[in-house]
Image (cartoon, rainbow, N blue to C red):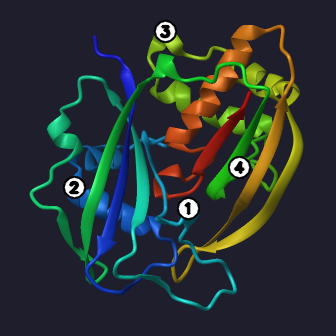
Amino acid sequence: MAGAVVVRLQVCFTVSKKVVIPPFSAKVSRLILHRVSKLYNRLSNLPKPLKPVSVSPLLHDGIALIKLKGDNRLLTLDVGENYYFSCGMVVNEDFPFDDLLSLESSIVDGVFGASAILRDIRVEVRRFDSFGFEKPRALMLRFISPVLLQLPSFRRFRHGRYVFFPFPSLIIGSLAEHWNSNCDKSLFIKSPSYLSLYSNYVLMESDFRIRPVTVVYDDKRMVRGIMGWVFYDLRKSRNTKSFRRIMALLDYAQYVGMGKSRGTGFGQVNIKCIY
């Protein structure tokens, strides 16, 4: 029986002419994916709350193209510039590769009034049991797009509330929930609440530059999340199994994001290990 794997697409493109794009550029990423990947179309339309799809906004020179509240400038793509985005998808390892990429041409027309010229597409496949870091001393988490972390529901507070600091328990709890909804049964995390609590003692923030931001999503909606970076020292742990699981979940986050609304471009993160 085929096991679950995570497939990551990394796409680089240019545009045929200068064009104005929506204030949250992940809409461009998703439009291109809809045109070139049958697999993405199928997974993004699944009727489940934790969709096995994560998409990044467009990146230019390592910076996400998003518009913050109070910024009156238009977001544009310029001729001759390279733009990037990535997409993570959880699938069975026997997925049809032809469905991953269905390219008849390197040109995708109708991208908000321009054509996207695909320059480079890279594919990476990871098995769930391959995730993890080899005993680093510290980790630096850099939030590429706004992260939406939410406290779990509690009694009459059915919808929890958003939190504007990356507490380890909220990060690990979010990731464990996503992991369990997509992994093979043999890798299921049986006590995610314990692992979430334990992570508060393993991951010790020693420096950070975090700020809450309000992102313009469209003409009607604004979304509030956090951006910046946080540096965690790793406390030595006697419970090596839980430590390895925390490291695996953080590695997993680089492919599927963290927090809410990963499929629409939020929660994208990059992690640097210090040994």
Label 2 is placed on what type of residue?
Answer: Val
Task: Give the amino acid type for the residue marked by disc 1 in the picture.
Answer: Gly
Image quarter of the C terminus: top right
Q: Which amino acid does label 4 sit on?
A: Leu
First in sequence: mark 2 or mark 3? 2
Query: From the viewer's perspective, is 22 left or right of 45?
Result: right
Q: Position of residue 256 (x, y in %)?
A: 51, 41
Q: Residue 185, percent across and down?
A: 47, 13
The residue that mark 3 highlights is 186
Residue to which mark 2 is pinned: 36
Label 2, secondary structure: give it.
helix
Q: Counting residues from the N terminus, which is met first, the one under dot 4 or under dot 3?
A: 4
Is residue 139 in view?
A: yes
Query: Image point 57% across, 51% down: which residue?
Result: 268
Q: How far across and down, in percent of the image, does residue 175 sit?
A: 62, 34
**Which mark identifies residue 62?**
1
Mark 2 or mark 4: whose residue is earlier in sequence: 2
Marks 2 and 3: which is nearer the front? 2
As drawn, 203 above or below 20: above
